[in-house]
Image (tube, helix red, strand yellow):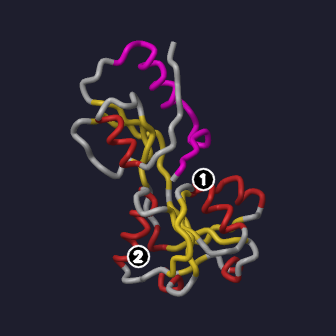
Amino acid sequence: MIKTTIHSMTSSQIMNSVENSQIDIGITYLFEKNQALETSVLYYDTFELIVSSQHPLSRFAHLSIEKLRNIPFIMLSPETAGRRFVDHVFKTYEVSPHIVMELSSSEEVKRMVELNLGVAIISKMSVADELRHGTLKMLKVNELDSTHPVGVVYKSGRYLNSAMQQFLADLKGMPETQFLGSE
């Protein structure tokens, strides 16, 4: 039998905690390579621009990153994988976003965007319900167009008993819609 406890933490914290054997298995963005860890991709995610359905930009389906220069942004906190990706894209295109809020989880970011306090770039997987209910709208920004692997990590060389092996197999068999990320 496996006793599971779920901890919400950033990608780097997950990697460190698995490497230091504080946790057995992590599910995270696989941006960083680490020789001490085994990884296996579960699904691919994208980061997308989201706005409130009340926001003036909501009438567009497509924007260039240039159009985001003076828009109030609600960002994930700097240590999250999503934020590091967004910062990298903005730096590449020499756009300095107007950041009005930094929050630690996508749930908080989504609520603030729904209240029309700014726009955000977060995981497409995390906004499925809001898009379905029409409280948020997703706009295509070509410069954000890349997929990011999300997967399971565990320590290299670690003995995995049959329960752990079954747990990993079950994770790999789950549809991607069952995974909820905190960043």
Residue 85 sits inside the magenta stretch = no
Q: Nearer the viewer, residue 6 or 36?
A: 6
Rounded to the nearest angstrom, the CA distance separating label 1 from label 2 is: 21 Å
Q: Which residues are magenta?
A: 160-182
**Mark 1: secondary structure:** helix
Q: Is residue 31 left or right of residue 164?
A: left
Compare marks 1 and 2 and give the one earlier in the sequence. Answer: 2
Image coords of residue 51 (percent x, y) = 65, 71
| Residue that protrudes farthest toward the left in the picture | 35
Q: Which mark is residue 143?
A: none
Residue at 76 percent of width and 63 percent of height: 134
Q: Quadrant of residue 158?
A: top left
Which residue is at a point 67% across and 74% down the rendered structure image?
Answer: 117
Above or below, comparing residue 129 to residue 137 in the picture: above
Amino acid on which disc 2 is placed:
Phe
Tell me, for residue 126, which label it has, or none. 1
Q: Position of residue 161 (x, y in %)?
A: 38, 14
Q: Is residue 154 above or below residue 64?
A: above
Q: Position of residue 114 (x, y in %)?
A: 71, 67
State whether the magenta stretch is mostly helix, strand or loop: helix
Q: Residue at x 70, y 60 (%)?
A: 131
- Residue drawn at x 61%, y 39% is 178
